[in-house]
Image: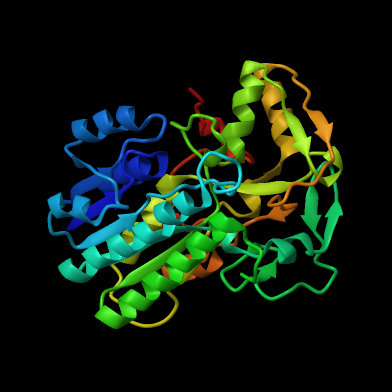
Amino acid sequence: MRILITGICGFAGSTLARGLLERIEGLSLCGIDNLMRLGSKTNRAVMKQLGVAIFYGDIRNASDFEQAPNVDWVIDAAANPSVLAGVNGSATSRQLFEHNLASTVNVLEYCKTHRAGFVLLSTSRVYSITALAGLPLKTEDGVFRLDSSNELPRGVSARGIDSDFSTEVPISLYGSTKLSSEKVALEYGFAFGFPVWINRCGVLVGAGQYGTPDQGIFSYWINPHLRRRPMRYNGFGGTGYQVRDAFHPRDLAGLLDAQIHNSRQVGTRVYAVGGGAANATSLSQLTAWCDSMFGKHEPQADDRPRKYDVPWMVIDSTSACGDFGGTAPRLCPKWSTKLPARRHRVESVEVC
């Protein structure tokens, strides 16, 4: 088995690489990365120690793929992952689309030429912000909870949100690039006859993150708490009751292993993948955990709403579990990492 990972020196790419090497006997693994992200050069050294061939290149440039060898599968883990990308000044809207959509076409052209399968790491931020904001919620113990006594829209249950949930705009510029990439990938697979899997990932959390906004709320929140920097509960009354779930990339590696070894030609190709209700926490609960670990540090309340914030998003992985090795309500035993079963998995985060 030969696999190429784009963005292999990022947090997700490098963690997936280690997980796949542990799982797939005889795996030949290579990767391409432009080394623009914090920590990528450190991860590059680790990958080389593991025998992974790293090619310096930018997938926005089709010619950079000319140095890549023929492979059986490509896992696309390269992206600008911030929901604020294109509007917060860190990258222009045009640059965002070049990073997240135009680059996908280059990867797909490579797959077409080499007859390689394609796995896209998409995002839960493809879901409608308006629909998420309209979910019936109640407040309990410092957290927003889904009120299942009310009628729920399609694609959401007490287990969380699945791939059938609304993707109507607005979903953010970032979300639109990933949703567009999903559709283009599926069309390429249908047109040119190669397998495509789409995984809409929740917040990825794990050791090796740097506490930057684009790496998700968990490491970002822990970093200023640890270093006693200013923190704010933004929007939703300034309470910190908003909820997300955490998901470790090593669990994702198990799913990808199952997908690339699956010979199914038809059926579902798009899956929601996340930590689920058992790994969900509010900001106020996360603050309490940080207080117990690092000492008390109180965030300021700022109830001004922000354009892309949502009050509650918990991802339901039931469909992926059912199709790829189990029906566990949170994560499938077949592809789950053997980590301590604690309410908050944030103990595995390191901030540098």
Observer-nearest of 22 and 314:
314
Residue 153: x percent and y percent?
73, 74
Residue 145: x percent and y percent?
79, 54
Image: 52 above or below 70: above
| Image point (56%, 59%), residue name | 175
Look at the image and name its color scheme.
rainbow
Image: 71 above or below 351: below
Image: 148 above or below 18: below
319 lies left or right of 34: right
Say whether residue 124 is visible.
Answer: no
Residue 220, quarter of the rendered image:
top right
276 lies left or right of 18: right
| Image point (37%, 83%), residue name | 266
Say whether residue 247 is visible.
Answer: yes
| Image point (64%, 64%), residue name | 161
Question: Which quarter of the figure is the N terminus placed in?
Answer: bottom left
269 lies left or right of 290: left
Residue 40, quarter of the rendered image:
top left
Residue 333: x percent and y percent?
45, 55
